[in-house]
Amino acid sequence: MTLESMYEYLPQLLKGLQTTLELTFASLFTGLILALLFTLVLSLRFKPLEWLVKLQILLFTGTPLLVQIFLIYYGPAQFPILQETALWSLLSEPWFCAMLALALNSAAYSTQLFKGAIDAVSAGEWEAAMALGMTRQQALTRIILPHAIRRALPAYGNEMILVMKGTSLASTITLMDLMGYAARLNAQTYDTLTVFSLAGVIYLTLTGILTLVVRFIERKALAFSN
Amino acid sequence: MGIVVEGLSKAFGSTQVLKDISFNIPRGETTVLLGASGAGKSTLLRMLNLLETPDQGTMKVADMDFNFTRDHDSKSLNKQACALRRKVGMVFQQYNLWPHMTVLGNLIEAPVVQGMPKEQATSKAKELLERVGLSEKADAWPSSLSGGQQQRVAIARALMLSPDVLLFDEPTAALDPAITNQVVEVIKELSQSGITQVVVTHEVEFARKIASKVIYLEDGHIVEDGSSDRFANPETEAFRSYLEH
């Protein structure tokens, strides 16, 4: 493990950085939108949908992310019928499949997080909203959810980091992210210790930056609780 | 246009909390519902804005008529409840302010959701904050205020929709005796504005200061119902002994 080799490997690994970041933010964004919808469905008890969301949570929190990525990427190819639909252009794309798996996985965990935070908001806050003539739906979307999300922010920060690290599994379906380049470099040089240490340091740096950003947002969003 | 209640009953499971309650509150009165805890006074108050649904009876509040039967249509009742609550404000024991919104945000939220333009809501909120003596707290977080201040914010919030009736559920139970006077002042000032107020409390001293009419409940029944003179001359032995202890 020499300094020269590190200098040599670093630019090669950083070629994957963009894919890692794109994958992280695209799946977090999609996952967040889904999680908010799922949370509304659970909180307002939309009957048939409620069961679907619960099933989704059961499946995606109950199985490994790697299994989910494999199933979403390799699964549809088993159904020739799918290959004729417009969806196929997306489902045959490893980037899209990895993003979808990460997003669905993150949505399942985030929904649990948000629902828990909503249940922790005191009944009095609901009652105050109802007593002012708001409907349950208005109370939820205008008051309870905004409060709950602020409370859930520290835990959601961890979820963001988990998704970022989870993107490394996308390299198993041919995606050339940070981990993809690290694996290729390792195969070329057999300099395993240097290559993966370097990859680890890059992930650690990303985690650090993300943590700082979340802390900053937390300070703003939770200013009311001091 | 006060409150008329006829034959209201409510049971939770097999416990009958209110039995055949009837009373009449003329417009503009400040009525105190007194009684020991468990007498049913809070449940009765919460029926007046339909936070609780009576099992039986009829009710006329803020010009809206309700007739309750055991098999009511909960969907249409929910709709009516929303309309009723816009005319009947409520103040809670624990204030129930929304902690993640500023004082001003707490005040304007409900009117804005219901279609009042934001500028109009804001100027109304500032007027009301001045009326309860908290104009400099508009941008403060609720958690930075004292209990008495929070309760006054809650009263201002309830007044934002210009209600005909204002309900108070033990508004001073969480407050210092010294701070209670702040709430007394606000309630007295409001009673001069012609709004109908109903206040649940178990504090006799507080009740004496604000009441123009008193209803005393025991065990789900109305025992005494009369003007505030009843504090000096109770008609029933039960109310007399309640006042004495």
Image (cartoon, coloured by chain):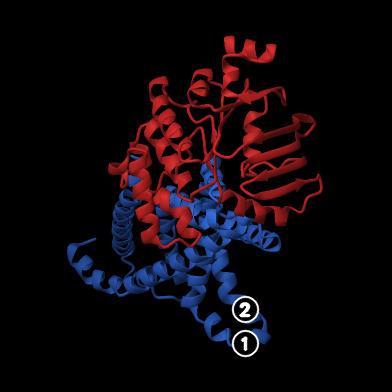
Chain colours: A blue, B red
Residue, x 39% and y 60% (percent of image)? B118
A212 to the left or right of B143: left
Residue A138 placement: quadrant: bottom right
- Report the label total: 2
Tell me if label 2 and label 1 are in contact, CB under 8 Å. Answer: yes
CA neighbours of label 1 inside 10 A, class few (<14), some (14 to 19), many (20+): some
User: Which amino acid type is marked by label 2?
Assistant: Pro
Q: Earlier in the sequence, mark 2 or mark 1?
A: 2
**Residue lying at the far bottom of the rendered structure:** A84
Q: Amino acid at mark 1?
A: Gln
Label 2 crowd (10 A; few <14 / some 14-19 / many >=20): some
Q: Is residue A142 left or right of residue A197?
A: right
Residue B172 position in % (x across, y down): 47, 27
Of residue A175 and residue A35, the one placed in the foreground of this image is A35
- Relative to A192, say whether B209 is above or below: above
> From what the image shows, is residue A40 above or below residue B157?
below
Q: Secondary structure at mark 1?
A: helix
The quarter of the displayed image where residue A160 is located: bottom left
Q: Which residue is mark 1?
A: A83
Q: CA distance from mark 2 to mark 1?
A: 8 Å
Can residue A187 be seen at all in this image of the molecule? Answer: no
Image point 48% across, 35% down: which residue?
B191
Quadrant for the N terminus of chain A in the image: bottom left
Return the residue nearer the eye: A62 or B185: B185
Q: Secondary structure at mark 2?
A: helix
The residue that label 2 is drawn on is A76
